[in-house]
Amino acid sequence: MTQTIAPRAAATTTGGVAFRVRVLLLLLLAVIGAVLAGAAPASAHAALTGSDPQQGAVVSRAPTQVSLTFSEQVAMSDGSVRVLDPKGKRVDTGKATDLGGTTYGVKLHSGLPDGTFTVTYQVVSADSHPVSGAFTFSVGAPSQTSVALSDPAVGGGVVGALYGVGRYVSYTGFILLVGGAAFMLACWQRGAGVRPVQRLVVSGWLALTGATLALLLLRGSYVGSGKVGDIFDLTLLGQVLQTKSGAALVSRLLLLAAGALFIAVLFGAYARRDEADVTDASGKDDGSDKGGVDVDAEKRDLTFGLAIGGAVVAAGLAASWAMAEHASTGIQAGLAMPVDVLHLLAVAVWLGGLSTLLVALFRAPAETQIDAVAVRRFSRLAFGSVTVLATTGIYQSWRQVGSWSALTGTWYGQLLLIKIGLVAVLVGIAWISRRWTAQLSEAPRTKAMATAGAKAGATAGATALAELRTKQPTKVPANSRDSSSEGSDSRDANSGGSNSAGSNSGNSRRAAQLARQQAAVATARQKRLRDADPARAGLRRSVLAEAGVAVVLLAVTTVLTSTEPGRTEEAAQQATSSSSQRSGPLSLKLPFDTGGQDGKGTAEVTLDPARVGGNEMHVFVERPNGKAFDVPEVKVAFTLAAKKIGPLPVTPDRIATGHWSAIGVQIPMAGDWEIAVTVRTSDIDQTTVTKNAKIG
């Protein structure tokens, strides 16, 4: 009965662990799928905030160049900006130039025809993300154009999806590598010799290294054509290595080589030193002095050296993100980059340590179960990490969002609110875990039970083996055998030796099997005793819940880092709205009174299309009864006081009674313009009336 129950008990416990791990893995895959399905095909962190000529503008003469202004600095190459005539033929010189600040331009050929021109651009923002778009302007008058922009948005497609997965895997690997190592050095030094924990940290290193190599190969196609075939283009790879993002990825690979050396020492010399200390603590040696060497001092020095070296490598890895992404551009970049490094390290120590604790609670062998002291140390370390995370996160949020309207009205701000909510949930679950930690029984009792169970299993196996050996067939002396057995003995003379050897071999196998079963019974009994501790069982459940929320939090953070910041998005929206808020002609009615006889009336000014560039203006002068008013003169002037532009005088031509018109009225800039209309009703009676209107 015992032989059949023991394997089932062990299988039940193992099956429960496997079920929880599978649930967590399915949650991870579901989150990745949802993120990839809901992500936009391109994540632009720099926005086009202006152009000359402006989008939709109609200019009277062809410009000599087209200039683009972005919300931050961008990287351009030859062909980044293309200008196409109505027939789709390129009319730019192909070489983009930096005009200062965040404005870039490209020269145009002379002798351009009238019609609608298309401007396309594809650049890389200062935080390493690709940006693309297009707009049109017209020379003389709008016309039909044969240009069709059917290419997929930059940063999208299969390459964009692979790049997003690579970013998620790289963040995950960084968290497991840094957080796992920090957990062992600061909280649970015995964990350096635990095989499941070792596998977790090594898996983090492998994931980060593999993802970095993949991102380096994908980078050229990601910011360029987006074609899968360009992934292994060595020419593109060479171009990537010359960019800031390429330098950051190469630096990360070099730091990972140093990280491999750190892992080798941590799981090699350091783990063996800890095992030696455990042996000394068992009573075989005092462990204080061996051959004149202070073992405790040597271990402290090794711990200190690993801590310093690991901190340098971890900070360097975090800086490889900070130097190439959000923190490297925008306001206060000099302060934002070290703050971003602290933020990433705090996330890694918290979530990576949480993952290591989860593995230790579920997968660590019974004889090396994590104790309450280590869990309490991690609780304090996690509290410090959350404090740093909150402080740096508040600063980063202010820097990237900038206003309450951007917090609720942009996708970046909404993702940030989701992240804050997930962090709050994690802190709440961590508080529950802290309560279980306070009730967690100390380790000596569990260790004693584990040792007793192991010894009991070994003793039972040895006893069973001894019993089987005592049941071996006893050899009968030759002088006591009767004649009736001689025939039989003589017939079995050749086979007796082999039968005896086979019997001994079978008994040995049965003894070994019985010993294994007895050990399994002891292990299962020890696991039931360990799991019977309600505090430890509660801690397992709460830590598993924390890990599940952490998976979702990491996915949201990955999407957040590839989303246009709220401050930039809001500025782009304002620029776009100011240039397109008028969808039709502008019409203003201005009552006037020149003071003389028959001097009252109304001047109606229409401006079409009421945008930056050339416009068609009409002025209709009417009497109070609505009939056309034949006045001798009408003048109009435009003033943009905010930019100290104007007044720009316009003298319209008389078309008919009460109707005046002007073609090609140039509005140089969008803004709140003052429109002044001067009406003369006689040789001495005239007046000027004004009204403000948004144009452009």
Image: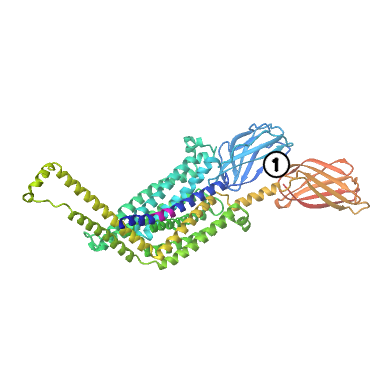
Magenta-drawn stretch contains 141: no
Q: Is residue 285 visible?
A: no
| Left or right placement of residue 131 versus residue 436 in this view | right
Residue 561 percent coordinates (x, y):
53, 50
Residue 522 percent coordinates (x, y):
30, 59
Q: Is residue 470 above or below residue 151?
A: below
Residue plotted at (90% across, 54% down): 595
| Left or right placement of residue 393 versus residue 444 in this view | right
Q: Nearer the viewer, residue 154 or 507?
A: 507
Q: Residue furthest right?
A: 597
* Residue matched to label 1: 56
Residue 577 percent coordinates (x, y):
68, 49
| Left or right placement of residue 608 versus residue 254 in this view | right
What's drawn in magenta, residue-wise?
14-20
Q: Nearer the viewer, residue 12 or 403?
A: 12
Magenta-drawn stretch contains 16: yes
